[in-house]
Image (cartoon, coloured by chain):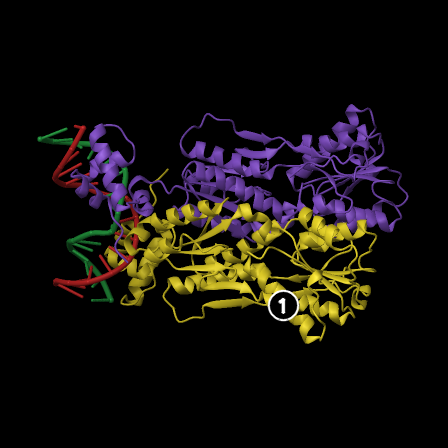
Chain colours: A yellow, B purple, C red, D green
Amino acid sequence: MVRSPTIRDVAKRANVAVSTASLALNGRPHVSHRTRLKVLKAAEELGYCPHQAARHLANGRAQNLGLIAPISLEHLFSSSGFFAQLIRGLHRAAAEHGYVLSLHIAESEEEAAARIRAAVRSRNVDGLVITNPTVSSPYLSDLKRHQVPFVFIGRPLEEATYVDNDNVEVSRIGVRHLIQGGHRRIAFLIGPDRFTFCQDRLLGYRSALDEAGIPCEESLIWRSELVEGDAYRVVRGSAPGRRFTALFAGSDVQAVGAIRALRELGQRVPQDVAVVCVNNTELAQHFVPPLTTVDLHEYWLGYWAGKRLVQKIEGEEEAEYRILIPAELIVRESCGCKFCAKGGDRVR
Amino acid sequence: MVRSPTIRDVAKRANVAVSTASLALNGRPHVSHRTRLKVLKAAEELGYCPHQAARHLANGRAQNLGLIAPISLEHLFSSSGFFAQLIRGLHRAAAEHGYVLSLHIAESEEEAAARIRAAVRSRNVDGLVITNPTVSSPYLSDLKRHQVPFVFIGRPLEEATYVDNDNVEVSRIGVRHLIQGGHRRIAFLIGPDRFTFCQDRLLGYRSALDEAGIPCEESLIWRSELVEGDAYRVVRGSAPGRRFTALFAGSDVQAVGAIRALRELGQRVPQDVAVVCVNNTELAQHFVPPLTTVDLHEYWLGYWAGKRLVQKIEGEEEAEYRILIPAELIVRESCGCKFCAKGGDRVR
DNA sequence: CTGAAAGCGCTAACAA
DNA sequence: TTGTTAGCGCTTTCAG
């Protein structure tokens, strides 16, 4: 291997000082047009590319965004597709601003804290995107002490910059669609209260009923963990003896579990029970019947988290502390509305 | 923010020279036990953590593994869950060896080449894991020139170190299961030939039939892109008029598309056509009927790719140039075998 | 076994 | 506008 050319090689070849070369290469002012061209040409000819670690050491910028993802709470993403899309969006934002994306996966809350600590203290990252802050976060003090910018994905309990859907709106969209379809007795299968998004979605459910003048029946609000099996168990236990013609499920896998239970109870979907859920995943898309669902646009969650983080890193602190990504209803067949009969699926 | 302590601070506090502190902190020889303890204690008290960029600059090691993923070929992963699991495994391997994982996503083959180039030339990574090398790769020259170690996930066309399943075996496992279920006329829905894994799986299909003494009928070999819609289209067009009692599909989404087509043609699954596919995803798990499938264990693909890459980086060049991850048959209901009737699903 | 000093490649004061 | 030079924090010879 031949030693990679350094900025000194470039400077020498262009007959200028290294500092001049540096200014020219970085597109900074105080360099004459001619000199700049000379330098650029020399760099080009040598195939010069700056050594990122050296820049980092010199100017303090790692040009690196870290994503902290607690994967053990994987079902939290309902489906791993959520995670993949989020990463794609975040990667795009990072790339647009010349940052590299590093991934820090933790299988537990403690591991997450440890990874954050390590990334911050070794100065590997300029900032962090932290997904799903569930508990009052032990690592916040570390972040504050090191002045490392960070953005949450998902509404945190503490006050902090975050990107999320308006989860009240998310379920309002879904429930409204059922109401418009003529349903008045709508069951709601939601996840654990420890997640802020579940709390919010419950509010949205109530709100949608409320605005339609439908009294909210507490016995139709069911809670399960965010996995198929538990959703099945809960619906299997709660549905018998209750009157309802529709179900709104907090996630795609919960919907799938619920449908399995309903079928065992002799209910057809959508004929006897209309179903709408959240998360536009492959599962929702290909299930039979295809599920009407609220798409969270997780790609954009990732993208805007990245954008916002870069803003913070680069010192535009005046920007908003919360970004809400609009959700979108994707109408398929599980809601049984007339529209679906004509095939109203979105083209991908 | 208080300036982070440097190794000089540690050295001063321990009353030793920086070089001694460095040796002590890195667990290297030529330091007396007492001195080492003194240094470690000082570091501990100061909350010292080395600046990674500085180490990198000094010793040439970025302690970073890059993952190159061509996401536009996303359907190539059949389901994005594949990707998420792979990342988890790779991350674990990286973490075990003290490396950070950086992600380089490309939406096209050219972008992949550009990202590889950038990562390598800016010396951001010590090595690369490259997924799904499909075409004779334009970036190989760059990699070779810079002597950057790399490992492919998926069998490449060129000779190079890679981790993969034995894809011949993958379909052999699936097809064998159908044969054991008494099927002799087994259709095969496979993906495009440009992917080596599809070529291999076709070989496995033939081999399984062969070992059972069943002649291979070419008219039962169908090809579709790796998306649901195309699988549907192909089966819809190819199935009518052909006699078969089972279908092996190259991926979960292909299976789902095929099943949709079969149902339209009045065939029930598994009663009229038994189905086995590849990829143990949420879709396969929750589909109705739950799909019998070959699990590729993508977590371990990622893990071993990472392990092998670290070996290369750290100079253990004598290791094997190919690692095959065993695949595993997950029996559910779509194959209609007796075992399933008793509920032979794997507990997750 | 320990310490002084020379870089790694780049940026950014400061001087010219 | 351009050049000189001192670090950034760490590792690593090379003397002591």
Image point 31% across, 67% down: which residue?
Answer: A33
Query: Circle 1 marks a residue in which chain?
Result: A
Q: Whole-percent x and y of residue B116?
A: 47, 47
In-image side of A285 versus B6 (left or right): right
Please state which of residues B71 and A103 is positioned toward the viewer in this rendering. Answer: A103
Q: Residues within 10 Å of mark 1 (few under 14, many from 20)?
A: many
- Picture residue at 34% right of the left edge, 49% below the top: A121
Residue at the spot of label 1:
A204
Q: Secondary structure at mark 1?
A: helix
Front residue of B301 and A5: B301
State the image coordinates of residue A104 (x, y, percent, origin top left).
46, 47
Q: Position of residue A159 (x, y in %)?
A: 44, 64
* Vertical position of residue A176 compared to residue B238: above or below: below
Q: Confirm whether residue A16 shows in the render.
A: no
Seen at 88% across and 49% down, the residue is B265
Which residue is found at the position 66% from the left and 68% from the top?
A173
Query: Which one is nearer the viewer's eye here, A318 or B347?
Result: B347
Amino acid carrying mark 1 in the image: Gly
